[in-house]
Image: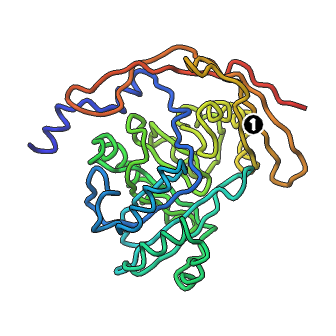
Amino acid sequence: MSTNKIHNNCHFCSEISQANGEDPIGSANVVEQYLIIEAAQPWTDNILTETDRIPQSLLEALNFLWEGGRKIQVIAIAPDREYSHPDYTRVFYYHRPAKFFAQFEKHEFIVPHPLLGSLALALLKHPEELPNFTQYRQQTKHIRELLICTHGNVDVACSRFGYPIYQKLRSEYAAANNSNLRFWRCSHFTGHQFAPTLVDLPQGQYWGHLKPEILDLLVRGNGSVKELYPYYRGWSGLSFFEQIAEREIWMQEGWNWLEYQKAGQVLASDEINQEWADVRIDYTTADGNISSAYQARVEVKGSVITARKSGEQPILEEVKQYQVSSLVKLA
């Protein structure tokens, strides 16, 4: 069957989601560590099972960490004609530097292919072995990395809508930002119904339902932050209800909010029906002079119909939608 025929008969989950007004907020993964590895395409629907690309020792370590409840996001990125090096594999590793933080701490290595497994194990389990990889470390903490999901073998919406966004970003913004910004095609990181979707690192913000006209604001931050409201999936440093509250705070505080160190907690919630939660977000300004907090009530405001997977007959489901019904800045 041709790709065109598949697309002609396909109902894309992201189009259903957008048409029904599904709000993407709260859908960012809660992450403690990111492990991002270059892997040549094509990718199957689960690249992490491909032992010819991912060393078996690394897969075993990841399974051990996942089973232990560690919040690790593993993503594959496609090699880039300009950025990548033949016979070498690029590895990004990001982690939370502290309970209160503004962005993830970045480490980048470019290693010969046979060393991929041992490097990843050193990053995840044996940090005392990292000095063995000093010669491969890259001094790129100043570079912002935007990863756009184009993983069509997981959901066709990601390639259909993600790749054009990637092309626009890669061609129009990469060269114009003085080598401080790179764009990558990446494997899925959940949220197909929000395609096109991306994750912005080291900030750790997730975005979805992206449109070409919003990209300039997202990349350059040269306008009102409030225009980004409907595209924001949340910050991966916070949990579900905390993410919903944090968006409202960001809209009030403006762009400087991204530089503030912050942490969240759910004070109380409806654990059975998930109808409401009381949330507190503590923060310290970038200069350290002000420490304060916001307290918010998050409540259900209704529901919409969405689809989490594209197909000829996608499964439709009802999902709750939330709003911040009160937000108070504490003295």
On the image, which quarter does residue 244 sit in? Answer: top right
Residue 83 location (% of width, % of height): 43, 72
Mark 1 secondary-structure assignment = strand
Residue 108 location (% of width, % of height): 54, 71
Considering every residue shown, the one lying at the far top of the view is 302
Looking at the image, which residue is at 39% across and 59% down? 76
Q: Is residue 80 left or right of residue 120?
A: left
State how the image is colored: rainbow
Observer-nearest of 328 and 163: 328
- Residue neighbourhood size for the residue with mark 1, other residues' Cα within 10 Å, grouped as few (<14), some (14–19), many (≥20): many
Q: Is residue 300 left or right of residue 37?
A: right
Considering every residue shown, the one lying at the far left of the view is 1
Looking at the image, which residue is at 37% across and 53% down? 187
Looking at the image, which residue is at 39% across and 68% down? 57
Residue 235 location (% of width, % of height): 60, 43
Amino acid carrying mark 1 in the image: Ile
Q: Is residue 325 left or right of residue 134?
A: right
Observer-nearest of 52 and 319: 52
Instruction: Assign the N terminus to one quadrant of the image.
Output: top left
Observer-nearest of 286 and 178: 286
Residue topped by disc 1: 281
Above or below, 2 relative to 138: above
Residue 138 location (% of width, % of height): 56, 77
Above or below, 117 relative to 322: below
